[in-house]
Amino acid sequence: MAEEQGLDLVEISPNAKPPVCKILDYKKFLYEQKKREKAMKAKASKVTVKEIRFGPNTDDHDYEFKKKHAEKFLKEGAKLKAYVFFKGRSIVYKDKGEILLLKLASELEELGKVEQMPKLEGKRMTMFIAPKKTK
């Protein structure tokens, strides 16, 4: 029947009992399938991660300036990676860095939730904040 119509016999689901086949143009079928997959991929949400860097002795004005940027990033729906970078001997101020990150987390509580609490990795203390879902 497929040869008479000049089309292909395509097996749709081989595991079914009996196997399901269709008579159609195979090239067109592949094209439609790729088109559907591309549309599904476009609908999938892409998570962007924005970074904000602090020093252990970051001043109040600098802190407020960076906090405003963090608020903007969370409102846009991006994840936030806030970290304190310890240079040289400033590693002795680990507690200051942790206090700074926890302060940021508490002030951004209504916009996002903490995904990972401050954790020291080498010379960086990192914390992740994910945006809250807006309805």
Image (cartoon, helix red, strand yellow):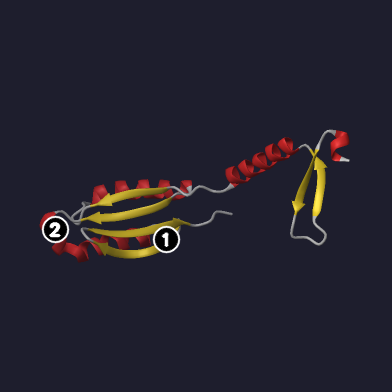
**Which quadrant is the C terminus positioned in?**
bottom right
**Which quadrant is the N terminus positioned in?**
top right
Decide which of tag 2 and tag 1 comes sooner along the chain: 2
Q: Residue furthest front?
A: 3
- Specify the amino acid type for callout 1: Glu
Q: Is residue 84 above or below residue 31?
A: below
- Locate residue 124 relative to residue 107 in the image: left or right: left
In which quarter of the view is residue 116 placed?
bottom left
Residue 49, horizontal then vertical, whole percent: 40, 49
Q: Residues within 10 Å of mark 1 (few under 14, many from 20)?
A: some
Compute the Cα span from label 2 to label 1.
Answer: 28 Å
57 or 41: which is nearer to us?
41
Q: Is residue 33 above or below residue 95?
A: above
Q: Secondary structure at mark 2?
A: helix
- Specify the amino acid type for callout 2: Ser
Q: Is residue 35 above or below residue 75?
A: above
Q: What is the number of the mark on residue 90? A: 2
Residue denoted by label 1: 109
37 or 44: which is nearer to us?
37
29 or 102: which is nearer to us?
29
Q: Residue at x 14, y 64 (%)?
A: 92
* Front disc: 2 or 1: 2
Q: Residues within 10 Å of mark 2 (few under 14, many from 20)?
A: some
Q: What is the number of the mark on residue 9? A: none
Residue 69, horizontal then vertical, whole percent: 36, 46
Residue 129, horizontal then vertical, whole percent: 40, 58
